[in-house]
Amino acid sequence: MSSKSALPDNLLCKKTQAAESNKNAILEVLKKELSINATVLEIGSGTGQHAATFCTYLPTIDWIPSDCNRESFESITSWKKVVSAENMEPPRLIDAASPNWNIGDVNRISAIVAINVIHISSFDVTLGILNGANKYLDKGGILYFYGPFFQKNVEAKESNKVFDQYLRNQNGCWGIRTLDEIEVLAKDRSLRLYNIIQMPKNNLSVIFQKN
Ligand SMILES: C[S@@+](CC[C@H](N)C(=O)[O-])C[C@H]1O[C@@H](n2cnc3c(N)ncnc32)[C@H](O)[C@@H]1O
């Protein structure tokens, strides 16, 4: 049989090398930063590898994957089946740049997570995530970004400068964001920068808390 439904689920589980190599380092940060029964909305889940890993190692949290691209859903739901993650909800179709997010019947969100999203999308997406965090996060909840950032008082690493130029050549709206600018916009949206953690390969974990 050659129909897609006859394939084992793990054949539909897509993988990226980037997610494979950063998932354990991110997991260690999330273990410290998420409350034990957190409800986490992930923006731009992509393949679903992160969702599957975090649901496996953080079994008491409730993880809601999402993406603006419905084509990601097959891989996300396949990962859910392959790791038997009962704590992973069905993926939501969410365009982070839009003012209203389809979060379903969830009535509290304790964390919003966006991994390698804001430099590979237009700045509207960064703004949309900040607006969404202001709108949907519980008081005291966290907004977590992972990826490369520039910082005004920190000399940019050569590899990040090269990567930024590469992104801008791919799409004029993409590019590594400057954390100081995001911090100002976040402040206007009741989000306080409370932790920056250096991660492998010149990436950062950046955590804002909702006032
Ligand atoms: C580089 S991939 C990262 C995927 C995953 N977070 C990871 O680290 O493996 C960027 C993801 O952001 C999603 N994305 C881009 N624009 C978006 C938007 N406006 N709203 C929500 N997701 C978006 C893409 O569909 C893609 O899945």
Image (spheres, rainbow, N blue to C red):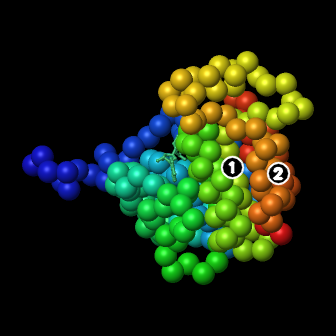
- Residue visible at 80% across and 70% down? 140
Q: Residue furthest left?
A: 1
Query: Quadrant location of residue 191?
Result: bottom right
Check disc 1: other Cα within 10 Å, few if <14, some if 14-19, many if 20+.
Answer: many
- Residue visible at 12% across and 46% down? 2
Residue 153: x percent and y percent? 90, 32
Query: Quadrant location of residue 62?
Result: bottom right
Q: Nearer the viewer, residue 114 or 181?
A: 181
Residue type, label 2: Val
Residue 120: x percent and y percent? 56, 39
User: Which quadrant is the C terminus positioned in?
Assistant: bottom right
In the image, is residue 8 above or below residue 65?
Answer: above
Q: CA distance from mark 1 to mark 2?
A: 15 Å
In the image, is residue 22 above or below residue 47?
Answer: above
Tags 1 and 2 touching, CB below 8 Å: no
Q: Circle 1 sits on which residue?
A: 145
Q: Is residue 190 visible?
A: yes
Q: Circle 2 sits on which residue?
A: 184
